[in-house]
Amino acid sequence: MNFKTVSIFIIFSLSLASCQAKTEKKSLIQKPTQNSLVDSVDLDILNSLKQIAKNLQFDSLTPKDQIIETGKLFLQTPYVGGTLENNEKEELIINLHQLDCTTYLENVLALSQSFGKSQTNVSDFSKNLEYIRYRDGKLNDYTSRLHYFSDWIIDNEKKGLVNNISREIGGEYYQKTINFMSSHISSYPALVKDSSLIEKIKETEKRLNSQQHFYIPESKIQKLENQIHNGDFIAITTKIKGLDVSHTGIAIHLNERLHLMHASSKAKKVVISELPLAEMIQKNSLQSGIIVARVISKQ
């Protein structure tokens, strides 16, 4: 069984799981870590991945191919925003059948790590996901989640999981005040419910605003796209006041151009962009450029 065949199988499995998810009430059946929730649909997906991984030589792939092939497994998976919100308390939500642009990257990175270590049980995956999603790898409360993607990159760079290469490949310094969450409290149910969290969010914003940030402006993306590798994580910067990043995805080269594999709110599913990334961003009046983070091999 080659990886292309496996991808088709998984895409079918994910599509089936998604259809079931729309009509069946979630059944929370297991807590693989103290603060995590996984339902029967996602447990079935993980178990399927575990069986398939036994037939693959995943550890023989390069790190960038591990990311690309894992990312492809989720093509056509429905886009659903806010899957991590509206819980009574902060818990590690495992959702493989509904993705937004950030949870897509987190799940791909966590799964690729599990595949690379031949560890595909739910406990190993949960530990990887928590380590990636939360500051210093520890789930404490709502504010320990890495809400701003700039913060996500900085924290996961400290963990040795990614390397922000934006500056070294020709990125430029940019300055922007990041305060979207504290300026739009009503958009975040957790902050409305517990106002004590607001100060912690402001502390995060203050720390982000004290650091230097680099990006590749939209006018330079095509010129530099050959320096961006398959499997690099792409964060799209935005002109929206107070916000650092508005969208994320995975770099993939097709027909000698750089495209984006991403959970698209417009397409309502995980897709590979029809347009090259440079043109895609130029067509969006609110997008300004990209930050590039390269996954670091742990092998």
Image: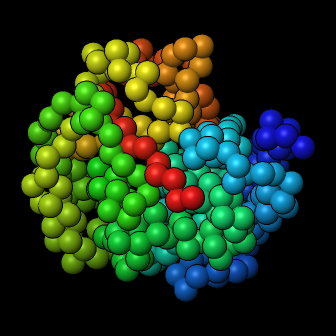
Q: Position of residue 220 (x, y in %)?
A: 29, 18
Q: Quadrant of residue 15?
A: top right
Q: Residue at (24%, 36%) from the top-left corner? A: 167
The mark total stands at 0
In the rendered image of this protein, does residue 5 appear above or below residue 221? below
Q: Which quadrant, please, contains the N terminus?
A: top right
In the rendered image of this protein, does residue 196 appear above or below residue 131? below
Q: Is residue 146 visible?
A: no
Q: Is residue 272 visible?
A: yes
Looking at the image, residue 175 sits to the left or right of residue 167; the answer is: left
Looking at the image, residue 203 sits to the left or right of residue 294; the answer is: left
Q: Residue at (84%, 60%) from the top-left corner? A: 54
Taking the view exactly as shown, the residue that stands out farthest to the right is 1
Looking at the image, residue 114 sits to the left or right of residue 217; the answer is: right
Q: Quadrant of residue 171?
A: top left
Q: Position of residue 254 (x, y in %)?
A: 59, 19
Q: Position of residue 62 (x, y in %)?
A: 61, 44
Q: Position of residue 229 (x, y in %)?
A: 48, 32
In the rendered image of this protein, does residue 1 appear above or below residue 112? above
In the rendered image of this protein, does residue 161 appear above or below residue 265? below
Taking the view exactly as shown, the residue that stands out farthest to the bottom is 34
Q: Residue at (20%, 63%) from the top-left corner? A: 204
Q: Residue at (69%, 72%) from the top-left corner? A: 122
In this rendered view, identify the residue nearer to me: 275 or 227. Answer: 227
Q: Which quadrant, please, contains the C terminus?
A: bottom right
Q: How is the image coloured?
A: rainbow
